[in-house]
Amino acid sequence: ICLGGQPAFALPVYEVRSPWELPLYLGLGVLASLVSLTYTQLNQLARRCFQGQIPGLGWLDAVPKPVKPIMGGACVGLVALHWPQIMGIGYETIQAMLQDVEFSLSLLVILLVLKLVITAISLGSGLVGGVFAPAMFLGASLGAAYGKVLGLLPALSVYIAAPPAYAMVGMAAV
């Protein structure tokens, strides 16, 4: 209701440039499964951390329940000072990745790792938030990074789609 009746993302037309490109999507699928597993495991680990169930972090169980989201929010805010893209649902950043706005490979990897960790801290601390939109963000950043790495290989660059195509597939895979 709040976002309106239009699609969440405007997608340009992507094309498969060669049948040789299709096996490359299998590699992206394997990486997406690893990101998905890491995502669920980190979310569970963060929840256990804030419940004081992890050795060395038992003191978190003594923290009053209303203070835990403040701690999580402070972590998110501190990271967002330098990387504001990790804030919120991230639709603007995802849209930029799908529209081939220039992101460096290192920035894509940093955003992937930070969104993994910050989402886990956020959910584990008790902040209100979902898991679907962050998963799309993770997939888009993984796919865009994967596409950029493939584009660096001179033998493949002519036969593969642009990084946004991989971002879209990665988003769906994660």
Image (cartoon, rainbow, N blue to C red):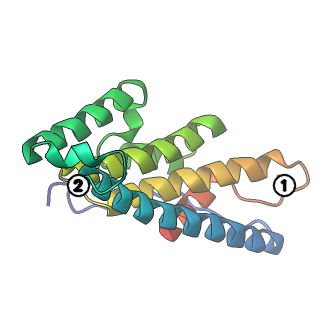
Q: Earlier in the sequence, mark 2 or mark 1?
A: 2
Query: Image check: 125 left or right of 78?
Result: left
How far separated are the C-alphas under marks 2 and 1? 51 Å
Res 14 visible: yes
- Rendered location of residue 61, percent (x, y): 19, 49
Contact (CB < 8 A) between labels 2 and 1?
Answer: no
Looking at the rendered structure, the kind of residue marked 1 is Val
Q: Amino acid at mark 2?
A: Gln
Q: Nearer the viewer, residue 161 or 126?
A: 126
**Do we see residue 90 in this rendering?**
no
Q: Nearer the viewer, residue 120 or 105?
A: 120
Work out which quarter of the rendered image holds the N terminus and state it: bottom left
The residue that appears at 32% across and 40% down in the rendered structure is 87
Q: Position of residue 62 (x, y in %)?
A: 15, 45
Residue occupying the point 63% across, 48% down: 145
| Residue underneath mark 1 | 158
Q: Quadrant of residue 166?
A: bottom right
Task: Estimate how packed mark 1 is, as few (under 14), some (14 to 19) or many (20 or more) residues with alpha carbons within 10 Å.
Answer: few
- Give the side of residue 128 with respect to residue 16, left or right: left
Report which residue position mark 2 lands on: 51
Mark 2 element type: loop
Within 10 Å of the Cα at label 2, are there few (<14), some (14-19), or many (20+) other Cα atoms? many
Q: Is residue 25 left or right of residue 114?
A: right
Q: 74 or 16, which lies in front?
A: 74
Residue at 69 percent across and 69 percent down: it is 25
